[in-house]
């Protein structure tokens, strides 16, 4: 169902539903936007922007709303740090540039009816994700709830995936399709990385997470 207008915070990242994201808020207009959301518990939308621009064609049309979970630090000059949580996915219908922050009329969407993943399928996806994380020098939380309905969202949030691929996952309307896409992507990346390391004769990493 269409709704709006929703205030937007374009960022060079993709927020997944349920994921926690730390942000440093420094620009005055976004201090007002996020500060207001922290006070009244309202949602704002996070959209992937390319090259830091907000012109048409530079921001994606699908994103995820966020709520402020906690203001973690305030600075004397008005900047502050927050942790936000992804809530629900949306697609922009019409952008509104009349205010200091971009807004949009949006429609919210969820997954279409589909067969849920079996516990064994979830465990297999988790194992592949942990293998990829180790190769990338990243970390994936060891806690795994087999009852979690959408493990693809939480795993994609924890891995340093290419933002374009994350955007594709965000827009898919089936957990089964997301899980299959994520598993195939990670298995292909693991294979390429192993082959490259064997060719170089080098093992280990430099201590920094590399994009998957």
Image: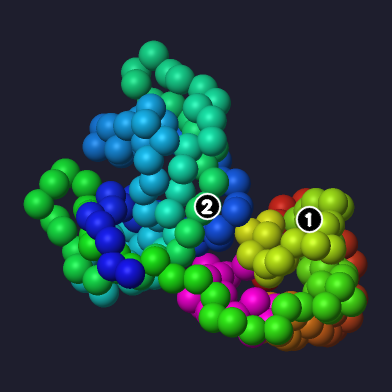
Q: Is residue 199 above or below residue 68?
A: below
Task: Say whether residue 21 is left or right of residue 61.
Answer: right
Determine which of the numbered discs, if any, sits on residue 152 in the image.
Answer: none
Q: Is residue 83 above or below residue 157?
A: above
Question: Percent x, y for residue 25?
Answer: 40, 35
Please, which residue is most extreme toward the left here? 98
Q: Residue at x 82, y 57 (%)?
A: 145
On the question of residue 1 being in view, the answer is yes
Q: Is residue 185 above or below residue 150?
A: below
Quarter of the image for the C terminus: give it: bottom right
Residue 206 makes an appearance in the image: no
**Residue 57 part of the magenta-drawn span:** no
Q: In this image, 58 relative to 174: left or right?
A: left
Question: In terms of depth relative to the viewer, which is nearer, 191 or 83?
Answer: 83
Earlier in the chain: of badge 2 and badge 1, it is 2
Q: In this figure, what is the number of numbered marks?
A: 2
Q: Nearer the viewer, residue 175 or 183?
A: 175
Q: Secondary structure at mark 2?
A: strand
Start and end of the magenta stretch?
A: 159-179
At 39% from the left and 14% from the top, the residue drawn is 76
Q: Find disc 1 in the rendering and name its residue.
A: 140
Q: Quadrant of residue 179?
A: bottom right
- Residue at the spot 9% in from the left edge and 52% down from the top edge: 98
96 displayed left or right of 30: left
Quarter of the image for residue 42 reads top left
Image quadrant containing the N terminus: bottom left
Q: Which SS type dominates the magenta stretch?
A: helix
Q: Which residue, given by chain and number where applicable, does mark 2 sit on?
A: 86
Q: Is residue 184 above or below residue 11?
A: below
Where disc 1 sits, the SS reads loop
Depth order, front residue of 155/212: 155
The reply to whether the C-beta atoms of the residues labelled 2 and 1 are less than 8 Å apart is no
């Amino acid at each position: 169902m269409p709704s709006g207008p929703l205030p937007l915070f374009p960022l060079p990242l993709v927020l997944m539903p349920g994921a926690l994201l730390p942000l440093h808020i420094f620009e005055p207009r976004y201090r007002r936007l996020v500060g207001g959301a922290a006070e009244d518990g309202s949602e704002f939308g996070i959209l992937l922007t390319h090259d830091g621009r907000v012109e048409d064609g530079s921001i994606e049309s699908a994103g995820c709303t966020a709520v402020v979970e906690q203001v973690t630090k305030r600075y004397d000059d008005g900047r502050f740090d927050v942790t936000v949580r992804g809530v629900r996915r949306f697609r922009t219908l019409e952008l509104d540039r009349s205010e200091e922050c971009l807004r949009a009329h949006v429609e919210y969407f969820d997954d279409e009816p589909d067969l849920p993943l079996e516990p064994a399928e979830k465990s297999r996806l988790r194992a592949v994700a942990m293998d990829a994380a180790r190769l990338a020098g990243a970390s994936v939380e060891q806690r795994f709830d087999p009852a979690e309905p959408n493990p693809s969202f939480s795993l994609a949030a924890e891995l340093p995936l290419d933002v374009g691929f994350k955007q594709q996952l965000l827009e898919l309307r089936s957990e089964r399709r997301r899980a299959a896409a994520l598993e195939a992507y990670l298995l292909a990346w693991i294979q390429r990385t192993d082959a490259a390391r064997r060719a170089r004769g080098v093992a280990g990493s430099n201590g920094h997470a590399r994009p998957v």
